[in-house]
Amino acid sequence: MRAVSARCYGSPEVLRLEAVARPQPADDQILIRVHAASLNPYDWHLMRGSPYVMRLGGGIGQPKDPWIGADFAGTVEAVGAKVTRYKAGDAVFGSGGGTLADYVLKRETESLAIKPATVTFEQAAGVNVAGITALQALRDHGGLQPGQRVLINGASGGVGTFAVQIAKALGAHVTGVCSTKNVELVRSLGADEVIDYTQTDFATGERRYDLIVDNVANRSISDLRRVLQPQGRLVIVGGAPGHWIGPLALPIKAVLFSPFVDQPMGMMMAKPNHQDMQTLADLMASGKLIPVIDRTYPLNEVAEAMRYLETGRARGKVVVTVGPTGG
């Protein structure tokens, strides 16, 4: 089978499409034929080994695990003797390691769910990292309640497009922040208000929010606190680029600042699990959540797909098609 690797750190040119042996499922595993996978900032951070602190766990001189990709959607090809939840032919989506490949192995207890018939494989392939991040940021870390006001900074990106829709499904009043070209997109996702940051500075306005989900980390802690309610929460999801600590800079400041103020603040990392994948599947099946795809690329153009993702201009998700896609 084919699989995308990065056997050294660097630019998208280090990505290689290799021929490797097709895996065989053990008794408790599922073999899935991948139809589509999506890219995340996490993937290019691993590819580049940046920020450098990531190399402490991922390999100092070169990656310990060269296989790229964390999101996928596909069809169950075969199941082990002990698997009961899934059967051959099921359309599924979820998380995994090395998902930019023709096949992946999963256990049925892991982050996996049946794909709703209402979304395509391409759409479902973009759900795992971005969708779970948005859900857990709003519900678990943000404690969002119906009727509360939430500001989503970076509302047109991968996590942001999910966050707008999930926040509305949770009953919140949603304000999205984005650039001029993305205003109509964010409004179409259900945002009650959209702030064009090229025209208006949300940090100087009079509106106060119960929760801010920051996907871009382009404002200071003091700016963000200024528009939070006295007991409001700040959840930092994204971060600014940088070679040493990069995206961790603002979250570290938030953690250091948090003990001295009443407003809880900090960074969160998504924890994929079956239950949350099922929650997202239910939202998609009900029509309350529709994954947004910016561009799709074939597997042999994965380097170009990664190059586009790194520009930071993607509206929604960047998807790589691997096998048959569509329904």
Image (cartoon, rainbow, N blue to C red):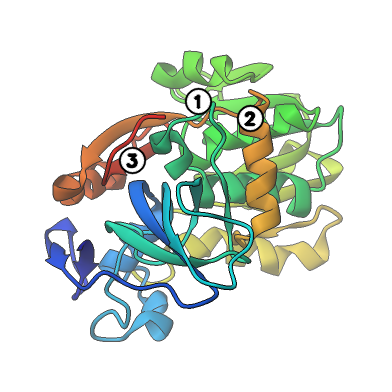
Mark 2 or 1, nearer chain start: 1
For the question of whether residue 311 can be seen, the reply is: no
Residue 184: x percent and y percent? 49, 13
- Residue beneath disc 3: 319
Q: CA distance from mark 1 to mark 3?
A: 27 Å
Left or right of 284? Residue 139 is: right
Q: Identify the amino acid type marked 3.
A: Val
Left or right of 10? Residue 143 is: right
For the question of whether residue 135 can be seen, the reply is: yes
Mark 3 or 2, nearer chain start: 2
Question: Which residue does the image show at 63% across and 50% down from the upper left?
Answer: 277
Question: Which residue does the image show at 23% across and 44% down from the upper left?
Answer: 305
> In the picture, which quadrant includes the N terminus?
bottom left
Q: Is residue 84 above or below residue 292?
A: below
- Residue beneath disc 2: 285
Question: Which residue does the image show at 70% across and 26% down from the upper left?
Answer: 174
Residue 250: x percent and y percent? 55, 59
Would you call the spot at circle 2 few (<14 residues within 10 Å), some (14-19), or many (20 or more)? some
Q: Farthest residue in the front direction?
A: 81
- Residue beneath disc 1: 197
Nearer to us: label 2 or label 1 = 2
Q: On residue 38, which mark appears?
A: none
Q: Quadrant of residue 55?
A: bottom left
Q: Identify the amino acid type marked 1.
A: Tyr
Mark 1 or 3, nearer chain start: 1
Residue placed most toward the observer, 108 or 259: 108
Residue 211: x percent and y percent? 75, 40
